[in-house]
Image: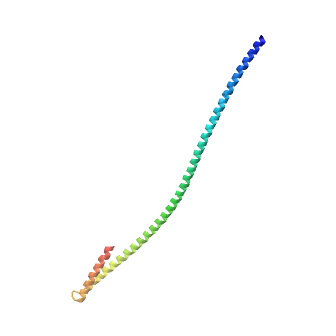
Amino acid sequence: LLTDRRIAELTGNLRAISDEMQDQIRRVDNMERRVLELRSQTNEKLERRCSELQRSVQRAFAEATSAQSCTKDFQEAETRHRQRLKSLEEDADERRSRDQNAKDALLRVCARLDALSSQVISLKQPAGAKGEQVSHLEEAMEAIQKKLCEQE
């Protein structure tokens, strides 16, 4: 009787241990499934993030290349504009110089005309053919002088 009881007790203990082992196995299987799912989800997220980063790097590289090209184009345009500006400044200086020379020449011509006009007045005779020629010459010189002085 004691042995039967002891066997029954050991059998009950073995069943309890067996049931507990089965529960532990199920828990481990469930945990393994969750770990695999998490690993799979993490891998998918990581792959998506890597793809996004790769696209971002490609966009940044393309933008940098474009910016570099734009910078180069801008520098070339700036160089052309600087050369053109220098050429225009040189032309403007040359024209100012020519204009000043022309103005100086006109002033000399006006001064000569004034001197000639004074000489004509002093040579003018009150009557006769010579006096008419001088008057006519004086009128022509005054007209020329007015036109030249107006152009200043």
Residue at x 31%, y 74% (from the top left corner): 150
- Position of residue 9 measured from the top left corner of the image (x, y, whole percent): 74, 15
| Frontmost residue, 73 versus 47 | 47
Residue at x 57%, y 48% (from the top left corner): 55
In this picture, is 44 found above or below 101? above
Residue 65 vs residue 116: left or right? right
Please state, as top left, top right, bottom left or bottom right, where the N terminus lies in the image: top right
Q: How many marks?
A: 0
Residue at x 52%, y 60% (from the top left corner): 73
Residue 98 vs residue 142: left or right? right
- Position of residue 31 measured from the top left corner of the image (x, y, whole percent): 65, 30
Residue at x 61%, y 41% (from the top left corner): 46
Residue 81 vs residue 49: left or right? left
Q: Quadrant of residue 26?
A: top right
Please state, as top left, top right, bottom left or bottom right, where the C terminus lies in the image: bottom left
Q: Quadrant of residue 133?
A: bottom left
Seen as rendered, the residue at the extreme bottom is 129
- Position of residue 22 measured from the top left corner of the image (x, y, whole percent): 69, 25
Colour approach in the figure: rainbow
| Frontmost residue, 50 versus 14 | 14
Seen as rendered, the residue at the extreme left is 127
| Frontmost residue, 93 versus 26 | 26
In this picture, is 2 found above or below 86? above
